Amino acid sequence: MVILAFMSGVWAEEQKLGKVSGKYTRETEDESATLEVKLLPDGKVHVRGMSLWGRNRKYGPNIGELDFKASINNGRVEYTEKIGKRQHYKLELIFVEGGLSGKEEGISTNFGLNVTFAGEYKKK
């Protein structure tokens, strides 16, 4: 019985994880972001994203891009980028019903000014 319960729990978790794959979008009047998430055979996820800030600016928007693989634990994915000895950038993606929530700490030097992946995304 214990083995069956464990296997059922693993199967349920695999089914839940399978639902994370897809395209997620966030949009406001002046900025937008898209994240594509794909569950890999090894249980990790591949996240690819683009964010724009200042879409209505005369000389075009500032741009940021992400492309990483990470483990998913309890419906959360974490990406960390170390910058020098003290600074870091961290993005946490939390999967929720119908979307995901992005939370950031620090500043990435790979993104244009004001570009962010933080916010509430809807799954397309």
Image: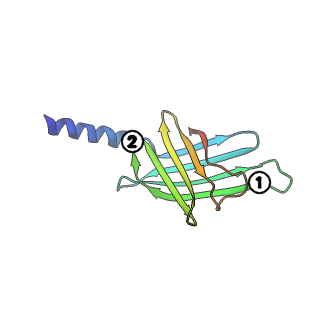
Q: Which mark is residue 61?
A: 1
The location of residue 44, given as percent across then percent down, is 40, 54
The location of residue 4, given as percent across then percent down, is 17, 37
The location of residue 22, given as percent across then percent down, is 50, 45
Label 1 CA crowd tier, 10 Å (few <14, some 14–19, many 20+) = some
Q: Which mark is residue 84?
A: none
State the residue at coordinates (80%, 55%).
Answer: 60
Instruction: Give the answer, above or below, for where 104 lies relative to 64.
Output: above
The quadrant of the image that shows the C terminus is top right
Amino acid type indicated by mark 1: Pro
Left-right relation of 70 to 5: right
Q: How many numbered marks are there?
A: 2
The residue furthest right is: 58
The CA span between labels 1 and 2 is 35 Å
The residue furthest front is: 86
Q: Could you say which quadrant of the image residue 48 lies in?
A: bottom right
The quadrant of the image that shows the N terminus is top left
Callout 1: helix, strand or loop? loop
Left-right relation of 5 to 76: left
Label 2 CA crowd tier, 10 Å (few <14, some 14–19, many 20+) = few
Left-right relation of 112 to 11: right
State the residue at coordinates (51%, 34%).
Answer: 98
Amino acid type indicated by mark 2: Asn
Residue nearest the observer in this picture, 37 or 82? 82
Instruction: Give the answer, above or below, for where 82 lies relative to 95.
Output: below
Callout 2: helix, strand or loop? loop
* Residue carrying label 2: 74
Q: Could you say which quadrant of the image residue 88 lies in?
A: bottom right
State the residue at coordinates (84%, 57%).
Answer: 59
* Camera-side mark, 1 or 2: 2
The location of residue 45, given as percent across then percent down, is 44, 53
Left-right relation of 35 to 57: left
